[in-house]
Image: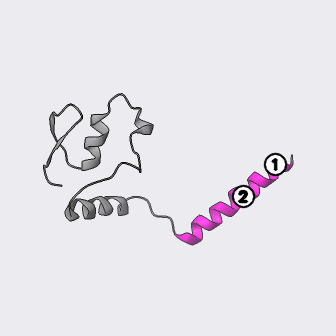
């Protein structure tokens, strides 16, 4: 990613590799589970978006058939535990 300079709420320049990091580091008082907010826009260049998508694609991938099979196993166990 580019070394763009972003400004935090304190108007302190911040260079980050990804725009979302600027949002996370600008709010240190917010717990880590609440830092990502889908209502806060992610502004970035096309290059930043593609790099973001490629990082997501590098993660674990579960085929649909396997995910459906795991869900059915979970559902049967869950429903059986509710009947006890």
- Residue 47 x, y percent position in the rendering: 20, 63
Kindly indicate the quadrant of the structure image that contains residue 32: top left
Residue 64 appears left or right of 40: right
The residue that disc 2 covers is: 75
For mark 2, does the 10 Å Cα neighbourhood hold few (<14), some (14 to 19), or many (20 or more) residues?
few
Q: Give the residue drawn at x 39%, y 32%.
A: 30
Number of the label disc, if any, that sits on residue 43: none
Q: Give the residue drawn at x 79%, y 54%.
A: 79
- Residue 5 x, y percent position in the rendering: 13, 45
Kindly indicate the quadrant of the structure image that contains residue 29: top left
Q: Give the residue drawn at x 39%, y 44%.
A: 36
Residue 16 appears left or right of 33: left
**In the image, is residue 78 part of the stretch drawn in magenta?**
yes
The residue that disc 1 covers is: 82
Q: Give the residue drawn at x 63%, y 61%.
A: 70
Quarter of the picture containing the N terminus is: bottom left
Asked if residue 25 is positioned above or below residue 36 in the image, the reply reads above
The CA span between labels 2 and 1 is 11 Å
Q: Earlier in the sequence, mark 2 or mark 1?
A: 2
């Amino acid at each position: 990613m580019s070394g763009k300079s972003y400004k935090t709420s304190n108007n302190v320049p911040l260079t980050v590799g990804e725009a979302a990091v600027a949002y996370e580091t600008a709010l240190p008082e917010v717990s880590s589970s609440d830092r990502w907010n889908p209502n806060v826009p992610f502004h970035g260049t096309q290059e930043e978006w593609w790099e973001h998508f490629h990082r997501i694609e590098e993660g674990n991938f579960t085929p649909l058939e396997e995910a459906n099979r795991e869900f059915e196993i979970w559902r049967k166990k869950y429903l059986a535990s509710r009947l006890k």
